[in-house]
Amino acid sequence: MADVDDPTFLTLAEAGRMIAARTLSPVELTDACLARMDAVDGVLNSFITPTPDLARRQAREAEAEIQRSGPRGPLHGIPYSLKDIYETAGIRTTGQSRLLADNVPDQDCPAQAALAAAGGVLMGKTTTWEFAHGGPSWDVVAPPARNPWNAERSPAGSSSGSGAAIAAGMCLASMGSDTGGSIRLPAAACGIAGIKPTYGRLSRRGILPNSFSHDHAGPMAWNCEDLAILLGFTAGHDPLDPACANVPVPDYRAALNGDAKGLVVGVPWRWLDEEAPISAAYRQAFEASLGVLRGLGATVRGVELPPILEYNDSKRVIAMAELFSIHEQDLRTRPDLFGASLRFRIMCGSLLRAEDYVQAMRMRARLAAATQAVFADTHLLAVPCAEPAGVLAATRPEWMFEAPSYTAPFNVTGNPALSICSGFDADGMPFSLQLAGRLFDEATVLRAGDAYERATA
């Protein structure tokens, strides 16, 4: 029996240690998460396809194996979920779209295969925005997810159900995707942690595409230690994904030493002061976070980056063009099956010229080079992630073209970027801090994030 009142709010690492010590059983943990799902998901809509029977079977199998020979590792017996764009053998994968309402893949994507091999317990597929892009929408396969901190608020997107499911105690971890912020924004809105790894760090094979050159797969969980564990199992080269990099995968967990001594953290103050100001309350929380990093031994200094709108403009043009290339045939032959939000955005892509795409790619190369130059003598960049979650409501599809995003720049450059909880506003909604690092140096990003979490726990 567990020696905690409610195991559903344990971190992955805590639960793994308890399972290894035989003070918590996988069956007990899974049953508790399923009970939470029964109690709250009728309101939160976190799961589009829950898999309770599979979860119970996998939990029993994990418990029996652990009793015989001990756990395979820290994920053995841990309940997790997958954003419903990850292909799963024999389990519906819809992308939240009526186009794929009955789509049942015949094999697992590499990320799911890795988590299953580690002994994880799959709780189901989580709600997303349509094809990880258009939303929030009510004219798709299922209604959008809601924020566990306040069900009238948005959990952001597009990995919305993943963020909500973790924050509500329905699973301890999830895998999301991030094309312009879709891991980090739900993590920020739901008060958890999420990392967009370096472009090419994880295989995207078997994950429904949104924008070939900006899509990233990555984990979401309660904290950076959990993210380090998940990355250790899912990162690595996949020769069948042409964008997947063949670079060594470090021991991410070993990098978590509890301090930020010697790290140089850059802040592009012009973004905050002139180009994309944030609210006074969020600015105060952000500057307090910088104070914590200083207290942990980091040096915080200003840096100069290209205008934030250039990153956003480059990303929008490229992503819209690639989105149209993915969905053109369905847009022409059965447009009525798309939700209105995604249909509008795909149509925008049809209006772009080849010259627009080429010029945006040239701009992207310039922006990436300028960003890597800053990282030559700076270990991390610290920037806001997003304002606390607003009311969940249908939005005008064109909203995404109107305001600069603090998350999109790191999809443009490919650098790893992390969102962690940095406090709460007057309404009890989470604030967030975003840390970005050098290419393929997720270890330093997680080290700083973990040190911050320990200092503010």
Image: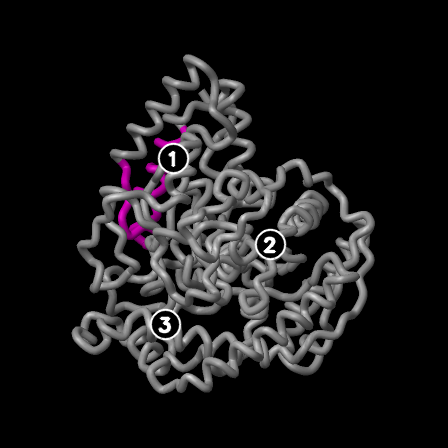
Badge 2, how many Cα within 10 Å: few under 14, some, many 20+? many
Amino acid type of the residue that numbered disc 2 sits on in the rendered structure: Cys
Q: How many marks?
A: 3
Amino acid type of the residue that numbered disc 1 sits on in the rendered structure: Ala
Above or below — where is 127 with respect to 123?
below
Quarter of the picture containing the C terminus is: top right
Q: Are marks 3 and 2 in contact (CB under 8 Å)?
A: no
Q: Is residue 318 left or right of residue 138?
A: right
Q: Which residues are magenta?
A: 29-52
Residue that numbered label 2 is attached to: 421
Q: Residue at x 50, y 38 (%)?
A: 233
Residue that numbered label 1 is attached to: 116
Residue that numbered label 3 is attached to: 323
Answer whether residue 188 is visible to the viewer in this image: yes
Q: Is residue 257 left or right of residue 17?
A: right
Question: Which secondary structure dominates the residues rendered in magenta?
Answer: helix
Query: Whole-Å distance between the Cαs marked 1 and 3?
Result: 30 Å
Mark 2 / mark 1, whichever is N-terminal: 1
Q: Residue at x 53, y 43 (%)?
A: 231
At numbered mark 3, what does the secondary structure look like: helix, strand or loop?
helix
Q: Is residue 298 left or right of residue 220?
A: right
Mark 3 / mark 2, whichever is N-terminal: 3
At numbered mark 2, what does the secondary structure look like: helix, strand or loop?
strand
Mark 1 / mark 3, whichever is N-terminal: 1
**Pair 3/2: label in front:** 3
Residue 383: horizontal and vertical position, in percent? 66, 66
In-front residue for pair 270/411: 411
